[in-house]
Structure formats: C-alpha cells, structure tokens
Amino acid sequence: MDYQTMLRQLYRDFNARHIDLILVHLHREVAWPNGWEGGFVAGHDEVRAYWLRQWQQINPRVEPVSFETRAENQMAVGVHQVIKDLEGEILSDSQVRHVYSFEAGKVKAMRIEQQ
C-alpha cells in the first residue's frame, strides 16, 4: 500500500470538504484527534460530525510538506496548517506533524505533534 499517495489525496479531499471520499480510507473504528475542541473522536459518524461542526465555525486548510515512514504501519506528515475565520481572517498559521497508524490498508488512528 502506498500510504504517501493515499495521504496526499486525503489532504486534497479535506481541503475540498469531500468528507465521504476521506471516510472511505478511514478504518470504521478510527481514532481521530479533535484538534479544534480537544480530545478525540472515534468512528466515521463522530469524525463526520466533528468536521461538519468545525467547518461551520472555521476554515482550516492543511498542506503536506514532508513524509516520514516511522514504522511498518506508521507515517508522519509535516503539515502547513492555516486556519481562517469564515470572513477570511487568519487565526493561525503553523507547522504541525500528523502521525498516522494504519490497519488493513486504512487509517486506524491519527495524532498531532507540535513541530
């Protein structure tokens, strides 16, 4: 499985707000960080609800800038993240690292590391 290609597509789909195209690549029991409100969400329904809630309040855009394989089923992605309010004002412009774990060819978990 070419995880780098999959993740590049997931970022494109996130920025285009294509939730269903992303969920196809997430494990049914995925653990996803709630980087906006805190904590984690689990499973497709919670991830969908979290993103929809987030996009009603803020306009995040994430662009991968580097990829690092950490273990057989783990990859870290350096990300340039720009968060704007709905009027287009920049709230945050930062670099973070998203660390993905995979199971059965799908994203099983993601966590955020500060760079």
Image: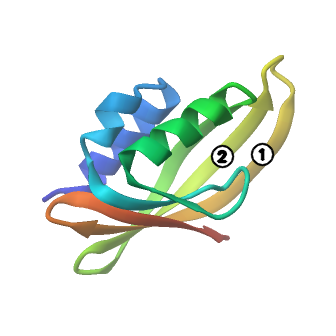
Measured as percent of width and height from the top left, residue 46 is found at 48, 47
Residue in view at x 42 percent, y 33 percent: 12
Residue positioned most to the bottom: 71
Q: How is the image coloured?
A: rainbow
Callout 1, which amino acid? Asp
Classify mark 2: helix, strand or loop.
strand
**In the image, which disc is placed on residue 93?**
1
Q: Quadrant of residue 9?
A: top left
Q: Distance between the Cα atoms at labels 2 and 1? A: 6 Å
69 above or below 10?
below
User: Is residue 9 at all visible to an observer of this figure?
Assistant: no
Residue in view at x 47 percent, y 23 percent: 16
Measured as percent of width and height from the top left, residue 90 is found at 84, 33
**In the image, which disc is placed on residue 81?**
2
Of residues 23 and 115, which is closer to you in this image? 23
Measured as percent of width and height from the top left, residue 1 is found at 13, 59
Callout 2, which amino acid? Gln
Question: Callout 1: 10 Å neighbours few (<14), some, many (20+)?
Answer: few
Of residues 79 and 110, which is closer to you in this image? 110
User: Is residue 106 at all visible to an observer of this figure?
Assistant: yes
Which is nearer the N-term, disc 2 or disc 1? 2
16 above or below 5?
above
Classify mark 1: helix, strand or loop.
strand
Given contact means CB atoms under 8 Å apart, are the residues at marks 2 and 1 in contact?
A: yes
**In the image, which disc is placed on residue 47?**
none
Residue in view at x 18 percent, y 56 percent: 2
Of residues 102 and 70, which is closer to you in this image? 102
Measured as percent of width and height from the top left, residue 13 is found at 40, 31
